[in-house]
Amino acid sequence: MKIGYCITGSFCTFSKAIDEIKTIKENGHDITIIMSENAYNTDTRFGKASEIVNALELISGKSVIHSITQAEPIGPKRMFDVLCVAPCTGNTLAKLACGITDTAVTMAVKSHLRNSKPVVIGVSTNDALGAAAKNIGALMNYKNIYFIPFTMDDPINKPKSMVCDFTKTLKTIELANDNKEVIQKIF
């Protein structure tokens, strides 16, 4: 498959996303990385932006798409079979649910969906059971949107926080490519 893999600013999950990107590549899939501008440019305690970008470019063998103008041709050129957004922050969930296109990632999703192709979302937000809940619910009802299984990551200390199971990313992508919903029992 040709897979577009989008990364938004849930910096604490970048290492898990990178591990899955390696797995996808090792399984023979062609992968292109798209990053929100914040994910592309922000140094955090989880890593320097330039080092993360370099690692992703090394894995994929391609330059990272990181601007709206770079992401716009994704749909017209039919670049991908499946587009994955993992991690997908509460901010990006809200933008996707409301049709806001102001980052490379939201443009990638909009552009890709014009071809009725699947978009896989990997939730990673501290407010999934708060303000982001309505956006997750709305997106679950949209055609061509699929979710990587997700769960609470720390119910005691972060009672509204949820994160996807990154180890199920490739399986979710494969099922979405066949227009099948992910059911926890199949794993």
Image (spheres, rainbow, N blue to C red):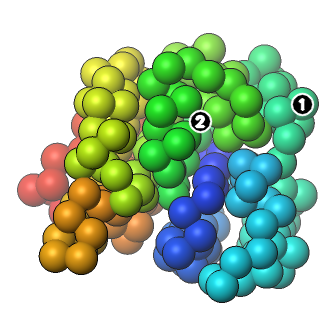
Q: Which residue lies furthest to the left in this view?
A: 185
Residue 2 percent location from the top left of the image: 65, 45
| Mark 1–mark 2 distance (CA, rounded to whole Å) | 20 Å
Question: Relative to 175, is 117 on the left or the right?
Answer: right
Q: In this view, does 140 lie above or below 174?
A: above
**Identity of the residue drawn at 10% across and 56% down:** 185
Residue 11 in view here: yes
Callout 1 amino acid: Thr
Which residue is at the front of the view, 163 or 31?
Answer: 163
Residue that numbered label 2 is attached to: 81
Q: For the image shown, how many numbered marks are present on the structure?
A: 2
In the rendered structure, find residue 28 and report the number of the disc placed on it: none
Q: Residue 69 carries which label?
A: 1
The amino acid marked with disc number 2 is Asp
- Say which label, 1 or 2, has the lower sequence index: 1
Query: Where is the C terminus found, in terms of image quarters?
Result: bottom left
Eyeballing the image, is 181 above or below 61? above
In the displayed structure, would residue 88 be above or below residue 92?
Answer: below
Say which residue appears at 77% left-offset and 75% top-offset: 43
Name which quarter of the figure residue 21 lies in.
bottom right
Image quadrant assignment for residue 151: bottom left
